[in-house]
Image (cartoon, rainbow, N blue to C red):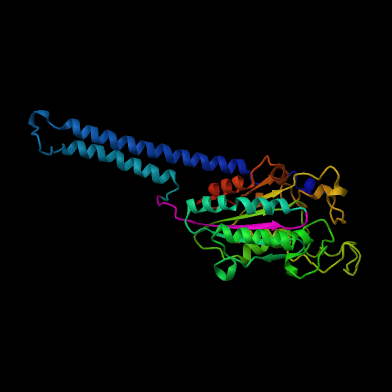
Protein backbone atom coordinates (compact mmCIF):
# COMPACT_ATOMS: atom_id res chain seq x y z
CA UNK A 1 0.00 0.00 0.00
CA UNK A 2 2.33 2.74 1.21
CA UNK A 3 5.40 1.35 -0.54
CA UNK A 4 3.66 1.09 -3.88
CA UNK A 5 2.16 4.56 -3.58
CA UNK A 6 5.56 6.18 -3.19
CA UNK A 7 7.63 4.03 -5.53
CA UNK A 8 7.35 6.31 -8.56
CA UNK A 9 7.97 9.63 -6.88
CA UNK A 10 11.22 11.55 -7.38
CA UNK A 11 12.78 11.70 -3.93
CA UNK A 12 16.16 13.40 -3.34
CA UNK A 13 19.08 11.17 -4.28
CA UNK A 14 21.26 10.86 -1.17
CA UNK A 15 24.09 9.36 -3.23
CA UNK A 16 23.94 12.37 -5.53
CA UNK A 17 24.08 14.77 -2.59
CA UNK A 18 27.09 12.94 -1.18
CA UNK A 19 28.81 13.00 -4.57
CA UNK A 20 28.21 16.74 -4.84
CA UNK A 21 29.78 17.29 -1.42
CA UNK A 22 32.77 15.08 -2.27
CA UNK A 23 33.31 16.96 -5.53
CA UNK A 24 33.18 20.28 -3.68
CA UNK A 25 35.75 19.05 -1.16
CA UNK A 26 37.95 17.77 -3.98
CA UNK A 27 37.86 21.17 -5.69
CA UNK A 28 38.81 22.83 -2.44
CA UNK A 29 41.76 20.46 -1.88
CA UNK A 30 43.01 20.94 -5.44
CA UNK A 31 42.82 24.71 -5.02
CA UNK A 32 44.73 24.41 -1.75
CA UNK A 33 47.38 22.37 -3.56
CA UNK A 34 47.70 25.16 -6.11
CA UNK A 35 48.12 27.68 -3.30
CA UNK A 36 50.89 25.71 -1.57
CA UNK A 37 52.70 24.95 -4.84
CA UNK A 38 52.58 28.61 -5.84
CA UNK A 39 53.95 29.74 -2.47
CA UNK A 40 56.87 27.33 -2.71
CA UNK A 41 57.60 28.29 -6.33
CA UNK A 42 57.51 31.97 -5.42
CA UNK A 43 60.00 31.47 -2.62
CA UNK A 44 62.36 29.52 -4.87
CA UNK A 45 62.10 32.15 -7.56
CA UNK A 46 62.89 34.91 -5.09
CA UNK A 47 65.90 33.03 -3.79
CA UNK A 48 67.29 32.28 -7.25
CA UNK A 49 66.90 35.93 -8.23
CA UNK A 50 69.41 37.02 -5.61
CA UNK A 51 72.81 37.90 -7.06
CA UNK A 52 75.17 35.22 -5.76
CA UNK A 53 78.21 37.40 -6.55
CA UNK A 54 76.93 40.17 -4.26
CA UNK A 55 76.11 37.78 -1.45
CA UNK A 56 77.85 38.56 1.82
CA UNK A 57 77.91 35.89 4.56
CA UNK A 58 75.67 36.93 7.44
CA UNK A 59 73.77 39.48 5.35
CA UNK A 60 70.09 39.19 4.33
CA UNK A 61 69.71 39.39 0.54
CA UNK A 62 67.12 41.74 -0.87
CA UNK A 63 64.83 39.91 -3.31
CA UNK A 64 64.10 41.49 -6.66
CA UNK A 65 60.91 43.56 -6.35
CA UNK A 66 59.59 42.38 -9.72
CA UNK A 67 60.13 38.73 -8.76
CA UNK A 68 58.24 39.20 -5.48
CA UNK A 69 55.39 40.96 -7.25
CA UNK A 70 55.16 38.21 -9.87
CA UNK A 71 55.12 35.55 -7.15
CA UNK A 72 52.43 37.29 -5.13
CA UNK A 73 49.96 37.58 -8.00
CA UNK A 74 49.32 33.85 -8.52
CA UNK A 75 49.24 33.37 -4.72
CA UNK A 76 46.36 35.82 -4.50
CA UNK A 77 44.65 34.06 -7.41
CA UNK A 78 45.07 30.71 -5.68
CA UNK A 79 43.60 32.08 -2.44
CA UNK A 80 40.57 33.27 -4.37
CA UNK A 81 40.28 29.79 -5.87
CA UNK A 82 40.29 28.19 -2.43
CA UNK A 83 37.60 30.57 -1.22
CA UNK A 84 35.45 29.95 -4.30
CA UNK A 85 35.83 26.17 -4.06
CA UNK A 86 34.58 26.22 -0.49
CA UNK A 87 31.44 28.08 -1.45
CA UNK A 88 32.78 31.50 -0.51
CA UNK A 89 33.20 30.62 3.18
CA UNK A 90 36.86 30.58 4.15
CA UNK A 91 36.23 30.47 7.91
CA UNK A 92 37.10 27.38 9.94
CA UNK A 93 34.00 25.54 11.16
CA UNK A 94 33.49 25.79 14.91
CA UNK A 95 30.16 23.95 15.24
CA UNK A 96 29.35 22.21 18.48
CA UNK A 97 27.82 18.70 18.39
CA UNK A 98 24.32 17.79 19.64
CA UNK A 99 23.12 14.18 19.39
CA UNK A 100 19.76 12.87 20.61
CA UNK A 101 19.03 9.15 20.95
CA UNK A 102 15.39 8.20 20.31
CA UNK A 103 15.14 4.59 21.48
CA UNK A 104 12.44 1.96 21.34
CA UNK A 105 12.47 0.37 24.81
CA UNK A 106 9.80 -2.27 24.14
CA UNK A 107 10.42 -5.88 25.15
CA UNK A 108 12.29 -6.81 21.95
CA UNK A 109 14.87 -4.02 22.17
CA UNK A 110 16.96 -4.89 25.21
CA UNK A 111 19.98 -5.78 23.05
CA UNK A 112 20.23 -2.16 21.85
CA UNK A 113 20.28 -0.77 25.38
CA UNK A 114 22.93 -3.34 26.33
CA UNK A 115 25.13 -2.37 23.39
CA UNK A 116 24.82 1.33 24.09
CA UNK A 117 25.52 0.82 27.79
CA UNK A 118 28.81 -0.92 27.04
CA UNK A 119 29.92 1.23 24.10
CA UNK A 120 28.55 4.75 24.60
CA UNK A 121 31.97 5.92 25.77
CA UNK A 122 33.24 5.55 22.19
CA UNK A 123 30.45 7.80 20.91
CA UNK A 124 31.05 10.51 23.49
CA UNK A 125 34.81 10.46 22.88
CA UNK A 126 34.43 10.67 19.11
CA UNK A 127 31.98 13.58 19.34
CA UNK A 128 34.25 15.46 21.75
CA UNK A 129 37.14 15.04 19.32
CA UNK A 130 35.07 17.01 16.80
CA UNK A 131 34.00 19.60 19.36
CA UNK A 132 34.63 19.61 23.12
CA UNK A 133 31.60 19.58 25.43
CA UNK A 134 29.30 17.74 23.04
CA UNK A 135 25.69 17.45 24.20
CA UNK A 136 23.56 14.29 24.21
CA UNK A 137 19.89 13.68 24.83
CA UNK A 138 17.71 10.60 25.27
CA UNK A 139 14.04 10.00 24.48
CA UNK A 140 12.61 6.56 25.28
CA UNK A 141 9.36 5.34 23.74
CA UNK A 142 6.94 2.45 23.36
CA UNK A 143 3.32 3.56 22.97
CA UNK A 144 4.18 6.94 24.47
CA UNK A 145 7.51 8.59 25.24
CA UNK A 146 9.58 10.30 27.91
CA UNK A 147 12.37 12.84 27.53
CA UNK A 148 15.05 11.66 29.93
CA UNK A 149 15.96 14.17 32.64
CA UNK A 150 18.91 12.46 34.34
CA UNK A 151 21.57 14.55 32.63
CA UNK A 152 23.55 17.45 34.05
CA UNK A 153 22.40 20.49 32.04
CA UNK A 154 19.14 22.13 30.99
CA UNK A 155 17.09 20.58 33.77
CA UNK A 156 18.61 17.17 33.12
CA UNK A 157 17.75 17.08 29.39
CA UNK A 158 21.42 17.28 28.39
CA UNK A 159 24.09 14.67 29.09
CA UNK A 160 27.78 15.46 28.67
CA UNK A 161 29.33 12.30 30.15
CA UNK A 162 29.17 8.66 29.12
CA UNK A 163 28.57 7.63 32.74
CA UNK A 164 25.19 9.36 33.05
CA UNK A 165 24.07 7.98 29.70
CA UNK A 166 25.05 4.47 30.80
CA UNK A 167 22.92 4.81 33.93
CA UNK A 168 20.00 6.08 31.85
CA UNK A 169 20.20 3.16 29.39
CA UNK A 170 20.31 0.68 32.26
CA UNK A 171 17.36 2.39 33.95
CA UNK A 172 15.09 2.19 30.91
CA UNK A 173 15.99 -1.44 30.31
CA UNK A 174 15.35 -2.61 33.86
CA UNK A 175 12.25 -0.50 34.55
CA UNK A 176 10.55 -0.40 31.14
CA UNK A 177 11.94 -2.99 28.70
CA UNK A 178 12.00 -5.84 31.20
CA UNK A 179 8.41 -5.10 32.29
CA UNK A 180 6.89 -4.06 28.94
CA UNK A 181 6.01 -0.68 30.45
CA UNK A 182 5.46 2.64 28.67
CA UNK A 183 8.02 5.37 29.54
CA UNK A 184 5.37 8.08 29.55
CA UNK A 185 3.52 6.23 32.32
CA UNK A 186 6.48 6.49 34.69
CA UNK A 187 8.21 3.73 36.69
CA UNK A 188 5.02 2.87 38.58
CA UNK A 189 2.84 2.63 35.46
CA UNK A 190 1.10 -0.59 34.40
CA UNK A 191 3.26 -3.36 32.96
CA UNK A 192 2.51 -5.77 30.07
CA UNK A 193 1.08 -2.69 28.37
CA UNK A 194 1.77 -2.95 24.64
CA UNK A 195 -1.62 -3.55 22.93
CA UNK A 196 -0.43 -3.30 19.29
CA UNK A 197 2.85 -4.18 17.55
CA UNK A 198 3.50 -0.72 16.08
CA UNK A 199 5.49 1.63 18.34
CA UNK A 200 5.09 5.37 18.81
CA UNK A 201 8.42 6.45 17.38
CA UNK A 202 6.80 9.31 15.47
CA UNK A 203 5.80 11.36 18.52
CA UNK A 204 9.19 10.65 20.11
CA UNK A 205 11.01 11.98 17.04
CA UNK A 206 8.76 15.05 17.03
CA UNK A 207 9.71 15.61 20.68
CA UNK A 208 13.39 15.37 19.75
CA UNK A 209 12.92 18.14 17.19
CA UNK A 210 10.91 20.45 19.45
CA UNK A 211 11.69 19.66 23.10
CA UNK A 212 15.44 19.07 23.20
CA UNK A 213 17.49 22.25 23.84
CA UNK A 214 19.47 22.30 20.60
CA UNK A 215 22.29 24.82 20.57
CA UNK A 216 22.23 27.45 17.85
CA UNK A 217 25.75 26.59 16.69
CA UNK A 218 25.37 22.81 16.77
CA UNK A 219 25.51 20.13 14.12
CA UNK A 220 22.24 18.36 15.03
CA UNK A 221 21.78 14.60 14.74
CA UNK A 222 18.96 12.30 15.86
CA UNK A 223 19.64 8.56 16.18
CA UNK A 224 16.51 6.40 16.10
CA UNK A 225 16.52 2.67 16.91
CA UNK A 226 13.31 0.66 16.55
CA UNK A 227 12.06 -2.55 14.94
CA UNK A 228 8.62 -1.52 13.66
CA UNK A 229 6.71 1.27 11.99
CA UNK A 230 4.40 3.83 13.63
CA UNK A 231 0.83 5.11 13.53
CA UNK A 232 -0.38 8.65 12.83
CA UNK A 233 -2.98 10.88 14.40
CA UNK A 234 -5.91 10.18 14.92
CA UNK A 235 -5.04 6.50 15.59
CA UNK A 236 -4.51 5.13 19.09
CA UNK A 237 -1.81 2.67 20.13
CA UNK A 238 -3.95 1.44 22.99
CA UNK A 239 -6.92 0.38 20.85
CA UNK A 240 -5.91 -3.15 19.87
CA UNK A 241 -9.29 -4.17 18.44
CA UNK A 242 -9.77 -0.92 16.51
CA UNK A 243 -13.24 -0.18 17.89
CA UNK A 244 -12.42 3.35 19.02
CA UNK A 245 -12.34 2.38 22.71
CA UNK A 246 -9.60 1.16 25.02
CA UNK A 247 -11.58 -0.78 27.58
CA UNK A 248 -10.30 -4.35 27.16
CA UNK A 249 -8.66 -5.65 30.34
CA UNK A 250 -7.42 -9.06 29.17
CA UNK A 251 -3.84 -9.41 27.90
CA UNK A 252 -2.55 -7.24 26.39
CA UNK A 253 -4.56 -4.67 28.28
CA UNK A 254 -5.80 -1.69 26.29
CA UNK A 255 -4.98 1.89 27.28
CA UNK A 256 -5.40 5.41 25.99
CA UNK A 257 -2.24 6.08 23.95
CA UNK A 258 -3.25 8.44 21.14
CA UNK A 259 -0.90 9.34 18.31
CA UNK A 260 -0.32 13.09 18.56
CA UNK A 261 1.31 13.92 15.20
CA UNK A 262 1.30 13.00 11.53
CA UNK A 263 4.37 12.04 9.52
CA UNK A 264 4.20 15.25 7.50
CA UNK A 265 4.06 17.38 10.67
CA UNK A 266 7.01 15.50 12.14
CA UNK A 267 9.17 15.95 9.05
CA UNK A 268 8.32 19.65 9.01
CA UNK A 269 9.35 19.95 12.68
CA UNK A 270 12.66 18.20 11.99
CA UNK A 271 13.42 20.45 9.04
CA UNK A 272 12.51 23.56 11.02
CA UNK A 273 15.05 22.49 13.65
CA UNK A 274 17.68 21.69 10.99
CA UNK A 275 18.00 18.11 12.21
CA UNK A 276 19.29 15.03 10.38
CA UNK A 277 17.76 11.67 11.31
CA UNK A 278 19.69 8.41 11.09
CA UNK A 279 17.70 5.29 11.92
CA UNK A 280 18.33 1.61 12.62
CA UNK A 281 15.20 -0.35 11.71
CA UNK A 282 13.92 -3.56 10.15
CA UNK A 283 14.14 -3.69 6.36
CA UNK A 284 11.55 -6.46 6.03
CA UNK A 285 9.11 -8.47 8.18
CA UNK A 286 10.43 -11.45 10.15
CA UNK A 287 10.11 -14.95 8.72
CA UNK A 288 7.63 -15.95 11.45
CA UNK A 289 5.75 -12.76 12.39
CA UNK A 290 3.45 -14.35 14.97
CA UNK A 291 6.45 -15.37 17.06
CA UNK A 292 7.94 -11.89 16.77
CA UNK A 293 4.97 -9.91 18.04
CA UNK A 294 2.04 -11.73 19.60
CA UNK A 295 -0.29 -8.75 19.80
CA UNK A 296 -2.54 -7.37 17.03
CA UNK A 297 -1.37 -4.96 14.32
CA UNK A 298 -3.05 -1.92 12.85
CA UNK A 299 -0.95 -2.07 9.65
CA UNK A 300 0.11 -5.18 7.68
CA UNK A 301 3.39 -6.94 8.42
CA UNK A 302 4.77 -5.61 5.15
CA UNK A 303 4.48 -2.12 6.63
CA UNK A 304 7.27 -2.64 9.17
CA UNK A 305 9.83 -0.67 7.08
CA UNK A 306 7.38 2.14 6.26
CA UNK A 307 8.55 5.57 7.27
CA UNK A 308 12.17 4.46 7.73
CA UNK A 309 13.47 2.68 4.62
CA UNK A 310 10.28 2.81 2.55
CA UNK A 311 7.64 5.51 1.94
CA UNK A 312 4.69 5.69 4.31
CA UNK A 313 1.46 6.07 2.32
CA UNK A 314 3.35 8.03 -0.34
CA UNK A 315 5.39 10.23 2.03
CA UNK A 316 9.19 9.82 1.88
CA UNK A 317 10.79 8.01 4.82
CA UNK A 318 12.06 10.23 7.61
CA UNK A 319 15.82 9.67 7.07
CA UNK A 320 15.54 10.43 3.37
CA UNK A 321 13.41 13.52 3.98
CA UNK A 322 15.96 14.92 6.46
CA UNK A 323 19.17 14.16 4.53
CA UNK A 324 19.92 11.23 6.82
CA UNK A 325 20.14 7.48 6.26
CA UNK A 326 18.62 4.20 7.44
CA UNK A 327 20.51 1.07 8.55
CA UNK A 328 19.48 -2.52 9.20
CA UNK A 329 18.87 -3.09 12.91
CA UNK A 330 18.91 -6.86 12.35
CA UNK A 331 22.57 -6.57 11.33
CA UNK A 332 23.21 -4.74 14.59
CA UNK A 333 21.50 -7.56 16.47
CA UNK A 334 23.49 -10.21 14.58
CA UNK A 335 26.77 -8.39 15.21
CA UNK A 336 27.58 -7.77 11.54
CA UNK A 337 27.06 -3.98 11.87
CA UNK A 338 28.53 -1.98 14.73
CA UNK A 339 25.93 0.37 16.18
CA UNK A 340 28.42 2.73 17.78
CA UNK A 341 30.88 2.78 14.87
CA UNK A 342 28.03 3.63 12.51
CA UNK A 343 26.80 6.38 14.83
CA UNK A 344 30.30 7.86 14.95
CA UNK A 345 30.55 7.70 11.16
CA UNK A 346 27.32 9.58 10.51
CA UNK A 347 28.11 12.23 13.13
CA UNK A 348 31.50 12.87 11.53
CA UNK A 349 29.96 13.01 8.06
CA UNK A 350 27.29 15.45 9.27
CA UNK A 351 29.68 17.74 11.12
CA UNK A 352 29.71 21.27 9.71
CA UNK A 353 27.58 20.16 6.75
CA UNK A 354 24.09 21.66 7.01
CA UNK A 355 21.38 19.25 5.85
CA UNK A 356 20.14 19.65 2.31
CA UNK A 357 16.33 19.47 2.16
> From the viewer's perspective, is 292 left or right of 324?
right
Residue 269: quarter of image? bottom right
Residue drawn where x is 33% and y is 38% of the image: 36
Front residue (pair 289, 108): 108
Residue range highlighted in magenta:
90-107
Residue drawn where x is 19% and y is 30% of the image: 48
Is any atom of residue 273 visible in this view? no
Residue 266 image position (x, y, % from top left): 68, 60
105 is within the stretch colored magenta: yes
Is any atom of residue 97 visible in this view? yes
> From the viewer's perspective, is 58 left or right of 148?
left
> From the viewer's perspective, is 340 left or right of 245?
left
Front residue (pair 101, 85): 101
Residue 327 image position (x, y, % from top left): 68, 45
In this view, 355 is above or below 35: below
Residue 248 image position (x, y, % from top left): 91, 67
Residue drawn where x is 78% and y is 47% of the image: 3
325 is within the stretch colored magenta: no
Amino acid sequence: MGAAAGAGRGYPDRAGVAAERDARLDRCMRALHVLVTTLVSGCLAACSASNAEDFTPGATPEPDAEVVQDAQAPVADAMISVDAASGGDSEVCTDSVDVVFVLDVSSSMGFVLDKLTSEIGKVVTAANELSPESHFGLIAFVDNHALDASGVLEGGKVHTEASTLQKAFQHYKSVYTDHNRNPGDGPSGPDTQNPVCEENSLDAVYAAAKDFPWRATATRVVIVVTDDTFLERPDNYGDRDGDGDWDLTNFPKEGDYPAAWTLTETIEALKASRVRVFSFTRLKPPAMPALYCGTPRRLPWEAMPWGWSQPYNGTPPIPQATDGENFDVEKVKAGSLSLTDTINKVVVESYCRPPIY
